[in-house]
Structure formats: C-alpha cells, structure tokens
Amino acid sequence: RPGAAGAALFVGHVDTETRPAVFYGLSAVRPGAKVRITRTDGTVAEFTIDDVQVFPRDRFDPAKAYGPRDPDRPELRLITCGGTFDRATGTYTANVVVSGYLTATASTGD
C-alpha cells in the first residue's frame, strides 16, 4: 500500500501501438519531483523522487528495481519500458525505474 513500510510498486506502459500510455513521460522525471497518490481511504501520500535509473533488460536486477532500500521506510517504485524499441521482438531494450520516498500525507480536503 503506498505509504506503508517497504516499496509500493506501480508498473505501467510507456506507450501502445497507437499512442502514449500512462507512464509516457516517466523517463523525464528528475530527483526532487513530487508524486501524489490518492489512496483508497481518501488520503494522499506524497513521495519525493530521489533516483531515476535505466536497467537494460538483459541485465535487469529485480532486487535493485523492486526491493526497498530501507524496509522500514515507505518507498515508491514507478516502472515502465525504456531504451529503444526493438521491432523484431516487439519490446523495449530497457526498463525505467523511478524511486521515491514518503515525505507527506494529507486528507484529500487539505
């Protein structure tokens, strides 16, 4: 759950065959940017981005991409395709992994 201890993961497409998808601009995010997530209880968890990495698919390390850096700290991972599109295989050559940590929570009325 976003804001709970450990890493909350959100994985989305960068594009479709015809248009950009939910994480189209993810590779342009920079450290210091804020990401606000409205949770099912109506509160908002705000995360500050501290790292953006591109992992080649052939050397993808799930522990680095998915695992928490500090298991007691609420963290966020946003993951999508990156690198170049390989038309022969129909896949991208890398994954973009954006990491952040919880810096604030608020009710949606704040």
Image (cartoon, rainbow, N blue to C red):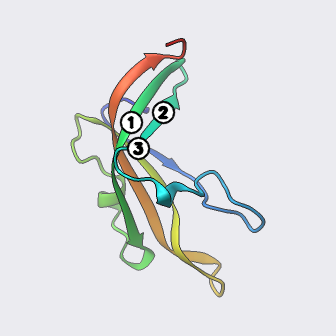
Residue 44 at x, y percent in the picture: 48, 24
Contact check, label 2 and label 1, Cβ < 8 Å: yes
Q: Residue at x 67, y 55 (%)?
A: 21
Left or right of residue 12: residue 99: left
Q: Nearer the viewer, residue 63 or 3?
A: 3
Left or right of residue 26: residue 2: left
Q: Name the mark nearer the viewer: 1 or 3.
A: 3
Q: Residue at x 38, y 29 (%)?
A: 3
Farthest residue in the bottom direction? 88
Residue 71 at x, y percent in the picture: 23, 40
Task: From the image, tell me which residue sits under label 1.
Answer: 47
Q: Secondary structure at mark 3?
A: loop
Task: From the image, tell me which residue sits under label 3.
Answer: 33
Q: Amino acid at mark 1?
A: Phe
Q: Secondary structure at mark 2?
A: strand
Of mark 1 and mark 3, the one earlier in the sequence is: 3
Task: From the image, tell me which residue sits under label 2.
Answer: 36
